[in-house]
Image (cartoon, rainbow, N blue to C red):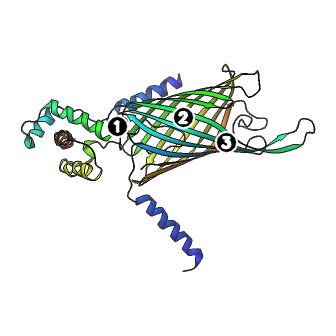
């Protein structure tokens, strides 16, 4: 009984834990201030690329850990100094996702 | 400045430098000596890891050094492999059955080659829970083993929580005509806090169960202690010191521990070097 309770508590804690947010329509509206053609599909693709390109090298930072404006220089630095292999359009999608979600959290 | 006052000052400066130095920490840098996290190397990335595990003290004098040299490599995204070369050196006392005298012996042996595959299923930040599957096959001159692990972890900001469910099945044929089976079931739990960019400090618990012949529970012990990690540029290191806290099964006479099957303490120093 005690073990079941402990397991249930542990699962509850994990379930309530913040994971990397999925973009919403509110964030699409925000992103359109800087990128008028921004869409939900693009932000989702940006999230996917962020996980694929960055999680293999370091623990992912949540978008809210930096100001929206800071993400531009972080992404540029990672491409320049850490030689992350990203095409310009992929870097742009990652930046759209991180900046938009950072602005709403 | 007198020499006696210089030593604490140098130690304090070294500590501060270690805590606040710029780090090149990678996702695959470990923060626990025994508990695995789910991170894997990127395709094409490699790492060389020398392991040293020291087992200290049983019912009589006992000192064991298990040395492993691991070469780890990323194969495709989310999948890594590794090869280990293992050696063991033991210095221990035993009682001579004929004379009753205590006899000290030393041995050094090649413990075979292990092959590992680790597949990451989910990420500890992007997903609600990080998860990975781990399989290790070992072949030595007189034994073979297969080890499977389910790895789970979660990052809560600077805190890392990880747990492993481990099953290891081993066959030994040291004596001609005799085949021994052994099953070990283990649960590992680690909690670590990133004190600075480079330095992490945490605790680990290991609950280890040995089943004689793969069926009957012979030994059940709990180890626990601190784990310190450091990530530098191009390398990382972890030191875990885990004394045996208690035995649930197989307790030695007059002791709260099982000193027939396990040591009083296990210490592991793990280093990783990446180009």
In-image side of B265 versus B84 (left or right): right
The subunit letter for the residue under badge 3 reads: B
Residue A16 in picture, x, y percent from top left: 34, 32
Q: Residue furthest top?
A: B215
Q: Residue furthest right?
A: B99
Q: Earlier in the sequence, mark 3 or mark 2?
A: 3
**Dot 2 lies on which element?**
strand
Q: Earlier in the sequence, mark 3 or mark 1?
A: 3
Q: Would residue A91 be seen by someone viewing this image from the given angle? A: yes
In-image side of B238 versus B20 (left or right): right
Which of labels 3 and 1 is toward the front? 3
In-image side of B187 versus B219 (left or right): left
The subunit letter for the residue under badge 1 reads: B
The subunit letter for the residue under badge 2 reads: B
Q: Would residue B30 be seen by someone viewing this image from the given angle? A: no
Q: Earlier in the sequence, mark 2 or mark 1?
A: 1
Report, in whole angstroms, how far the alpha carbon at label 2 lies from the one at label 1.
Answer: 21 Å
Report, in whole angstroms, how far the alpha carbon at label 3 lies from the one at label 1.
Answer: 38 Å
Q: Which mark is residue B125?
A: 1
Q: Which mark is residue B88?
A: 3
Q: Quadrant of residue A96?
A: top left
Task: Say which of B235 and B155 sits in front.
Answer: B235
Do the residues indicated by labels 3 and 1 lie within the same chain of the protein?
A: yes
């Amino acid at each position: 009984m005690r073990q079941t309770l402990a397991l249930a508590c542990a699962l509850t804690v994990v379930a309530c834990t913040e994971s990397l947010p999925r973009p919403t329509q509110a964030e699409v509206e925000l992103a359109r201030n800087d990128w008028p053609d921004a869409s939900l599909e693009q932000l989702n693709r940006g999230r996917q690329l962020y996980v694929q390109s960055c999680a293999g090298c370091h623990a992912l930072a949540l978008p809210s850990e930096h100001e929206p404006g800071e993400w531009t220089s972080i992404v540029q630095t990672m491409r320049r100094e850490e030689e992350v292999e990203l095409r310009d359009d992929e870097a742009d999608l990652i930046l759209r996702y991180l900046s938009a979600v950072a602005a709403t959290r | 400045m007198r020499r006696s006052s210089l030593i604490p000052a140098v130690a304090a400066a070294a500590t501060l430098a270690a805590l606040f130095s710029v780090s090149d920490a990678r996702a695959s840098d470990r923060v626990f000596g025994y508990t695995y996290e789910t991170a894997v190397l990127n395709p094409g990335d490699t790492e060389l890891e020398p392991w040293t595990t020291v087992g200290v003290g049983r019912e009589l004098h006992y000192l064991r050094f298990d040395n492993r040299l691991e070469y780890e490599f990323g194969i495709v995204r989310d999948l890594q492999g590794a090869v280990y070369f293992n050696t063991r050196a033991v210095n221990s006392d035993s009682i001579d059955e004929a004379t009753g005298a205590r006899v000290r012996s030393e041995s050094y042996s090649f413990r075979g080659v292990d092959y590992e595959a680790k597949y990451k299923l989910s990420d500890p930040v992007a997903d609600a829970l990080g998860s990975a599957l781990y399989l290790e096959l070992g072949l030595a001159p007189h034994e073979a083993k297969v080890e499977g692990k389910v790895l789970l972890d979660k990052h809560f900001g600077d805190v890392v929580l990880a747990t492993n469910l481990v099953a290891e099945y081993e066959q030994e044929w040291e004596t001609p005509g005799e085949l021994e089976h052994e099953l070990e079931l283990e649960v590992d739990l680690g909690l670590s806090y990133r004190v600075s960019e480079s330095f992490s400090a945490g605790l680990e618990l290991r609950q280890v169960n040995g089943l004689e012949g793969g069926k009957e529970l012979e030994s059940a012990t709990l180890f626990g202690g601190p784990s310190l990690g450091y990530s530098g540029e191009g390398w990382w290191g972890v030191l875990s010191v885990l004394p045996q806290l208690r035995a649930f099964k197989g307790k030695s006479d007059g002791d709260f521990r099982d000193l027939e099957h396990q040591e009083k303490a296990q210490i592991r120093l793990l280093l990783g070097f990446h180009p």
